[in-house]
Each structure stands twice: as structure tokens, then as C-alpha cells.
Amino acid sequence: PDHGLPVLSATGLRRTFGGLMAVDDVSFDVRSGEILGVLGPNGAGKSTLFNLISGGLPRSGGELSFLGTPLARVSACARGLSRTFQHAALVSEMSLIENVAIGATHLGRCGVLAASCGLDATEERRLLGWSQHLLDRVGLGDKAWDSAGTLSLGHQRILEIARALAADPVLLLLDEPAAGLRANEKTLLADLLLRLRAEGLAIILVEHDMEFVFRLADRLMVMNFGRRIAFGQPEEVRADAGVQEAYLGV
Ligand code: ADP
Ligand code: MG
């Protein structure tokens, strides 16, 4: 398939923790309008890879380039890049719209909204308008003022994605968004990811659920013990003997 421009490329990425190679010489790229799946058993280095990309964690080696520009060794928070976390970080007492607004203001650490963060009424109205637009976009618009804690797990995952979209990213990193979801919730989530892909977003999808990844990924990377053991079209990867031995358990 003919995908768009490279949004992110990684060359020889490494991260050690003491003597442990959590990410070991990993190279890949992801393009606009593409879903790159990342599979691998527990401890393979998937979350560490996300932490290296999204900048929270300094790398021990390798290069990252975002939209053609090299990212510094610690890229505090590259604009245009958003992520969700393996363990949800929603504020359950707050409304959906406030949770999204936090993502838009980068004021998450304030823990409270506009009034106490010094936004004037016009800015606050604009922020809430943008947040409502994002909730509409992911199909949660009618629940905007419910508290996040009342949502089903599937809707919480979708809310996290809405919050990640608030920064208007070109690359979205999703860490196990389908974990623990029921089949109908997975379908909702898959539909959303396909819509975002069609809008031109680049998505890196780390997932345990192989069926979910194979359904969505344009290309797939498989990791094991920190190393990339396969990278390519899903059918090629599925047929790869090393992958079958290491991961697919066939
Ligand atoms: P995955 O997300 O694929 O399950 P992780 O990236 O979480 O894997 O972990 C990869 C390896 O790095 C594991 O062996 C894990 O124990 C180790 N690791 C991850 N984060 C740290 C850390 N902050 N300090 C020490 N070891 C870590
Ligand atoms: Mg993980």
C-alpha cells in the first residue's frame, strides 16, 4: 500500500537499565495515514520504546527523527506527538470535557481547570468549544458533562484518545488501548482508529491482543527481549518462523 510521508523514524534506538537492554538496536518508521502495530511478549520493551519516543525517558543510543527533524536526546515533549498510557490517567471525578481540556492546555499538573489556571472567559470558552469538538469527533459528545468515572472501560479508553487528540497531534502513540475490553468495545475502538487513520494521523499501536493488531495494522513490528525480531506487512510477519517461535506460540 502507498502510505504518506514518514512522520517518525527511529534508527538503532537503545535503552539500558543497569545491565538490562530494555530496547536494543531498534529501527522503524511510521508514515502519515498509517497504523504501525507493535507486538511482543511482556517485558519485550514496548512501553520503554514509547517512553523513548514521547520523550520522558532519555535514550542510551540511537537516533529519532520527527517530521524530518532530529529529536534531541531528551525531547521534552515534541509538538505534534501525543500518547496514551498503559494504565489510564483519567481524573474520574472530573467531567469528560474537563479531562479533554486538560490535554489541550498542558496544565494537567494544575489538577483544576481554567479559572484557577488563569484563563480568561474567552479563552475558557474556546477551550471548552475545542474539547466539545473532540468529544463529538470520537462519539462521546452527548456525555460531555458526565463525570469520567461513570464511563464504561471502552468509553474511558476512547476518552483518553480524545484527550491525546487535544494537542492536535500528527502522531498518536497508543499503549494497549484494547486491554480488558469486550468484543463490542474493541469494535468501537477499532472503528475510531480507522477513522483517525483516514484523517491522515500516524498511529503506533502497542497491543497484546494479536487479533486486534492484525485487524488494524498496515505494518507490524515484533519485539522480543528488547530487539526487533520482525518488521513488515502483517501477512509476512505472521508467516515469519522466528515470530512464530518467539511469540505466536505456534
Ligand atoms: P513491555 O511494555 O513490552 O512489557 P517494558 O518496556 O515495560 O516491556 O519493559 C522492558 C524491560 O525493561 C523489562 O525487563 C522491564 O522490567 C525493564 N524496565 C522497564 N522500565 C524499567 C525501569 N524504569 N527500570 C528498570 N527496568 C525497567
Ligand atoms: Mg508495556
Image (spheres, helix red, strand yellow):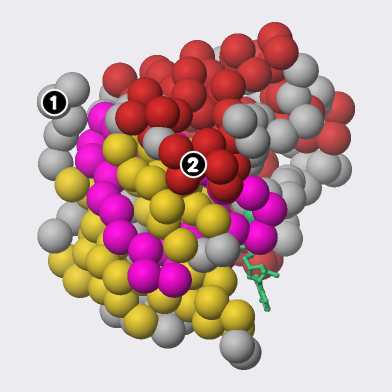
**Residue with the mark numbered 1:** 2
Q: Secondary structure at mark 2?
A: helix
Residue sitting at x 24%, y 57% = 9
State the quadrant of the C terminus.
top right
Residue sitting at x 41%, y 75% = 14
Separation of disc 1 and disc 2 at Cα?
Answer: 25 Å
Res 29 label = none
Q: Number of numbered discs present?
A: 2
Looking at the image, residue 112 sits to the left or right of residue 171; the answer is right
Q: Earlier in the sequence, mark 1 or mark 2?
A: 1
Counting from the top left corner in percent of width and height, residue 99 is at 66, 43
Ligand number 1: quarter of image:
bottom right
Residue sitting at x 71%, y 13% = 183
Looking at the image, residue 195 sits to the left or right of residue 182; the answer is left
Which is nearer the eye, 153 or 30? Answer: 30
**Residue 115, above or below 208:** below
Q: Which residues are magenta?
A: 24-53
Counting from the top left corner in percent of width and height, residue 131 is at 52, 34
Kind of residue at disc 2: Val
Kind of residue at disc 1: Asp
Q: Is residue 198 magenta?
A: no
Which is nearer the eye, 168 or 132? Answer: 168
Residue sitting at x 33%, y 30% = 236
Res 243 label = 2
**Residue 74, above or below 19:** above
